[in-house]
Image (cartoon, rainbow, N blue to C red):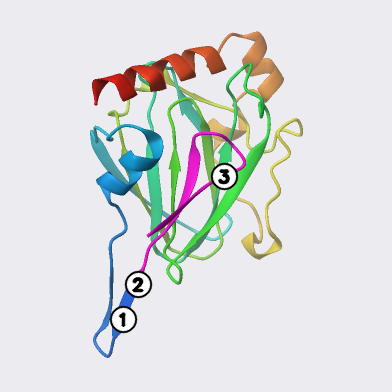
């Protein structure tokens, strides 16, 4: 398993080693100890989610209040999606910037996003099946969104996504500037303090 930090601090791409033979293949798509070595603490997993999406479907940009927010470990079981991490932490050196990882059923990569980061993906195939491990249960009162088409974020969606499909919840979400003005966004300081508290529990 190879773990690479993305251009957004506290987000990582995980590439598993696949073992194949004439029966098929085997891989470890999550190893708590390898991730703990990288981020400084073990994940306290609270919920596992699956989404199945048509080609062109966009889900996000989603985030939750910190603390405790919700760290995510995401992979694709079937199909392909481009998965985005957006830095929405006020005061971060990469605030407003994003990075992306191709998740598919060929390389079978995963992406880890720490608490306080924004998350979004676009399905590149029909029946793109995403699996998420998360560190807190869904709490609608603490969940927020940013419009994934916001020009201030300027996500680039690849042509193979085709016609984009979005939910009213996501298209009605505020842009980054509006979310900042309304006090919805986490801060870099609060995020770092929370990460430090998790590291001290180890």
Crowding near pointer 1: few (<14 within 10 Å), some, many (20+)? few
Write down the residue under mark 3: 6
Q: Earlier in the sequence, mark 3 or mark 1?
A: 3
Where residue 25 appears, as percent x and y from the top left, is: 29, 77
Name the residue at 70% across, 34% down: 153
Name the residue at 31% across, 81% down: 20
Q: Are marks 1 and 2 in contact (CB under 8 Å)?
A: yes
Can residue 167 be seen here?
yes
Dot 3: what SS? loop
Q: What label does residue 18 carry, if any?
A: 2
Where residue 7 appears, as percent x and y from the top left, is: 62, 41
> Relative to 68, is 122 above or below?
below
Q: Are marks 2 and 3 in contact (CB under 8 Å)?
A: no
For the residues marked 2 and 3, what is the alpha-carbon distance in whole angstroms? Answer: 22 Å
Q: Where, by quadrant of the figure, is residue 16 drawn?
A: bottom left
> Relative to 8, is 181 above or below?
above
Write down the residue under mark 1: 20
The furthest residue to the bottom: 22
Q: The magenta stretch spans which residues?
A: 1-18
For the residues marked 3 and 1, what is the alpha-carbon distance in whole angstroms? Answer: 28 Å
Q: Earlier in the sequence, mark 2 or mark 3?
A: 3
């Amino acid at each position: 398993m190879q773990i690479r930090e993305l251009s957004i601090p506290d987000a990582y791409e995980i590439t598993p080693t696949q073992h194949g033979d004439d029966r098929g293949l085997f891989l470890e798509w999550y190893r708590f100890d390898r991730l703990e070595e990288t981020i400084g603490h073990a994940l306290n997993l609270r919920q596992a989610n699956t989404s199945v999406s048509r080609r062109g479907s966009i889900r996000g940009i989603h985030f939750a209040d910190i603390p405790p927010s919700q760290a995510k470990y995401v992979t694709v079981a079937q199909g392909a999606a481009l998965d985005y991490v957006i830095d929405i932490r006020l005061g971060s050196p990469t605030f407003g910037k994003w990075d992306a990882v191709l998740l598919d059923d060929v390389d079978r990569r995963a992406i880890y996003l720490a608490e306080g980061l924004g998350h979004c993906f676009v399905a590149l195939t029909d029946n793109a099946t995403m699996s998420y491990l998360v560190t807190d249960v869904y709490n609608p009162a603490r969940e927020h969104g940013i419009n994934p088409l916001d020009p201030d974020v300027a996500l680039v969606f690849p042509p193979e996504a085709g016609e984009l499909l979005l939910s009213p919840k996501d298209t009605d979400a505020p842009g980054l500037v509006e979310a900042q003005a309304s006090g919805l966004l986490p801060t870099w300081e609060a995020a770092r303090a929370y990460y430090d508290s998790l590291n001290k529990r180890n």
